[in-house]
Amino acid sequence: MEGMDAMPPSSSSANGTNEMMMHMTFFWGKNAEILFSGWPGTNSGMYAVALMFVFVLSLLVEWLSHGNLIKDGSNQVAVGLVQTLIHAIRVGLAYMLMLAVMSFNGGVFAAAVAGHALGFFLFGSRALKKAVPMPSNGKTSDDFLEI
């Protein structure tokens, strides 16, 4: 069949042969391709921008996961559709983040983990939330789980 045996894009190596360079183990360095071909390139400034992008992306995923973005509404169908849209956006961003981490660059991995950690601390943990009194016995929800 025509087109079935097409070779992937390659770059010329020092010995004159065409080889495709793809990391399959973690490596450290600014020369990585993250999400798009040729991005961020060999520029240190663009690598820093790429790391910040990954960090903000993982922070956004945590915000969408733990944020209470929908107020109680009267129309349950509309609320369900908005919840579905938010879920689809969150999953799409999470898959994009997974693909960025699959570059096997240690800096990208560290930025993603740091973004998830800060995002969970800000939006998912009880560290910054006010205690909500429970109506049964006056205790707060924080009184039931002691660490």
Image (cartoon, rainbow, N blue to C red):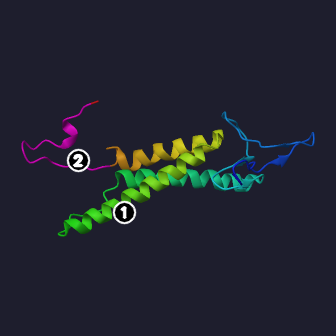
Q: Tell which residue pokes out farthest to the right in this image.
A: 15
Amino acid type indicated by mark 1: Leu
Quarter occupied by the C terminus: top left
Q: Is residue 18 left or right of residue 35?
A: right
Is residue 60 something one can see in this rendering? no
According to the picture, the residue beneath numbered tag 2 turns out to be: 131
- Tag 1's secondary structure? helix
Q: Residue at x 42, y 55 (%)?
A: 90
Question: Counting other residues with Cα less than 10 Å from the Cα at mark 1, is it few (<14), some (14-19), or many (20 or more)?
Answer: few
Count of marks, rendered view: 2
Residue 80, compared with residue 143, is above or below; it is below
> Where 142 falls versus 90 (above or below)?
above
- Labels 1, 2: front one: 1
Tell me residue 64's x, y (percent). 39, 55
The residue that appears at 76% across and 42% down in the rendered structure is: 21
What whole-number distance in Å separates the C-alpha atoms at marks 1 and 2?
Answer: 29 Å
Q: Position of residue 52 (x, y in %)?
A: 60, 53
Q: Earlier in the sequence, mark 1 or mark 2?
A: 1
Specify whether residue 50 is in view: yes
For mark 1, what is the residue? Answer: 85
- Identify the magenta region: 129-146
Q: Amino acid at mark 2?
A: Ala
Q: Residues within 10 Å of mark 2 (few under 14, many from 20)?
A: few
